[in-house]
Amino acid sequence: MNDEALSVETGPAVSIKRDILPELLGYQLRRAATRVYGSFGEHLRGLGLTQGQFGVLVLIGANPGLPQTALAQAIGSNRSLMVRTIDRLEAADLVRREASPTDRRSHAIMVTDAGRAMIDRLKTDVRQHEDRVARALDAEEFDTLLTLLAKLNDS
Amino acid sequence: MNDEALSVETGPAVSIKRDILPELLGYQLRRAATRVYGSFGEHLRGLGLTQGQFGVLVLIGANPGLPQTALAQAIGSNRSLMVRTIDRLEAADLVRREASPTDRRSHAIMVTDAGRAMIDRLKTDVRQHEDRVARALDAEEFDTLLTLLAKLNDS
DNA sequence: TATTGTTATACTCTATAACTATA
DNA sequence: TATAGTTATAGAGTATAACAATA
């Protein structure tokens, strides 16, 4: 468990002692996040989206009409970063900045028809991807993992 | 579960529908990794280290004498990035580049006495930190979570 | 006076290519 | 010809401050 055979592109495999790392929640979380989150990222790149844009798009789809600042707060980000994210989603014709009916400073962010179609497609894709990447776990283990992570995150 | 009250610094709390995100392993993994991995990062910053440097330092401590390329492969990184990591660890007097006895192109990376002391200290710190950040889980849940993550990662 | 969206800046992380010295 | 370490460069992501329009 503390040794891992690493396949090396050139030269022989290297056996590395990982000491306490495999017992650390942070270490295993980061490996898992990189693996699960990263490989779906490659799929998204083929569609011209990043992980962050995907998350924001889903959020907009579920909460149309919010101003940019509220979206930024919802993902623990800030207004400045949200500008470019919305810029790109708007350039891809997935969302629209509409005039807020109540505040002429702010934009109400809406999903376009293409954005709605993209969200529906990505929901299917992401579930398929998770089934594939987590096929080492049976349904009960997958559910337990998700439950424990949610318990940790929401504490 | 799909609603989360977000405390906002200025203005009222915002209630956001998160749609499918909370059911996604990738989403929960990323939140948990950011939470666990990130808060220990602040502690490390006080010691002049980054997360990446911490991981490499532990690896070097457990595998003294390896060349930089092997270390890079062990963390899924590359030679170029490892140069600056070793530079910084060496500037902090935690590791040393020694001449390889068998290959004059390569360095054997060794831990200094200060590096060994730092590793021992950080091993204590990181366990304390994990106990604190995961106190929403009892011992059995913590163990189950770690086991499931390892199963996922090693598949 | 405070807030929204925006721009500019800077700093880190990451990925790639190219150089040098050795093998 | 290939490899180890290094350097340079460019692209993302992130954090902060400041500005104009509006509240």
Image (cartoon, coloured by chain):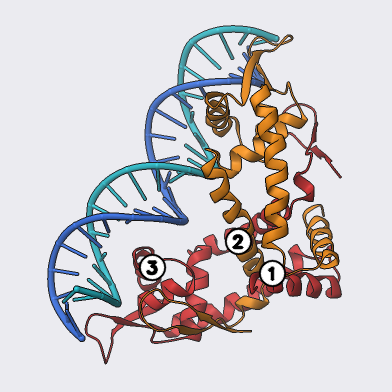
Chain colours: A orange, B red, C blue, D cyan
**Looking at the picture, does residue D23 appear above or below residue B14?**
above
Residue at which label 1 appears:
B152
Residue at which label 2 appears:
A35
Q: Nearer the viewer, residue B135 or A95?
A: A95
Residue at the spot 75% in from the left edge and 71% down from the top edge: B148
> What percent of the width, then of the height, locates residue B79?
35, 68
Callout 3: helix, strand or loop?
helix
Name which quarter of the figure residue A79 lies in. Answer: top right
Mark 3 and 2 residues: CB-CB less than 8 Å, in contact? no
Q: Amino acid type of disc 2?
A: Arg
Residue at the spot 51% in from the left edge and 85% down from the top edge: B62
Q: Amino acid type of disc 3?
A: Met
> What percent of the width, then of the height, locates residue A2?
60, 84
Residue B155 is left or right of residue B104, and the answer is right
Quarter of the image containing the C terminus of chain A? bottom right
Residue A88 is left or right of residue B147, and the answer is left
Q: Amino acid type of disc 1?
A: Leu
Question: Is residue A74 at all visible to an observer of this figure?
Answer: no
Query: Which tag, 3 or 1, sits closer to the chain's start?
Result: 3
Q: Which label is found at residue B82?
A: 3
